[in-house]
Amino acid sequence: QVQLVESGGGLVQAGGSLRLSCAISGGTFSSYGMGWFRQAPGKEREFVAAIRSSGIYYGDSVKGRFTISRNSAKNTGYLQMNSLKPEDTAVYYCAAGPSCSSSGCHRYPSMYGYWGQGTQVTVSS
């Protein structure tokens, strides 16, 4: 059974940085695509970034500021977040899912079968 555990969230001032980690057990990120999503209160879950067999992808609002990566030896994925803004405040979720071939499929939460519990990121102005 695949399990994901996020860590690294917290409170940071605008302009600061945080690095989120996602540890996977019961599977490996080489077998699954990995994605990061976020959800702010009253809003839908938003695509942030993904590493899939087809490439690396970012949501428009985080391009140039966030970097997704993974360490296969440690079975851990990361989301480095720089130049944080108050609008980045949300619960961030790590997700894993099988390969998908349709265009843009990495953006859809339904393409990921496994989710972590989420970690809160709060950016103060």
Image (tube, rainbow, N blue to C red):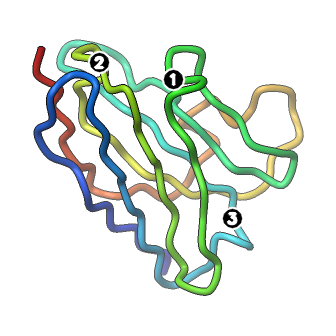
Q: Residues within 10 Å of mark 1 (few under 14, many from 20)?
A: some
In the rendered view of the protein, which quadrant contains the C terminus? top left
**Would you say 94 lies left or right of 6 here?**
right
Q: Residue at x 11, y 22 (%)?
A: 124
Q: Residue at x 61, y 30 (%)?
A: 108
The label nearer to you, 3 versus 1, is 1
Q: In the displayed structure, would residue 96 be above or below residue 92? A: below
Label 2 and label 3: CA atoms lie apart by 30 Å
Which sits in the foreground, 38 or 122?
122
Label 2 and label 1: CA atoms lie apart by 10 Å
Q: Is the C-beta separation of discs 2 and 3 under 8 Å?
A: no
Tag 3's secondary structure? loop
Mark toward the start of the polypeptide (2 vs 3) = 3
Mark toward the start of the polypeptide (3 vs 1) = 3
Residue with the mark numbered 2? 85
Label 3 and label 1: CA atoms lie apart by 23 Å
Residue with the mark numbered 3? 32
Q: Residue at x 22, y 49 (%)?
A: 9
The label nearer to you, 2 versus 3, is 2
Report how many numbered discs are placed on residues in the image: 3
Q: Residues within 10 Å of mark 2 (few under 14, many from 20)?
A: some
**Would you say 37 lies left or right of 74 here?**
left
Q: Amino acid at mark 2?
A: Lys
Q: Amino acid at mark 1?
A: Val
Q: Amino acid at mark 3?
A: Tyr
Q: Name the spot of residue 62 as percent of width and height, x first.
A: 51, 23
Q: Residues within 10 Å of mark 3 (few under 14, many from 20)?
A: some
Tag 2's secondary structure? loop
Residue with the mark numbered 1? 62
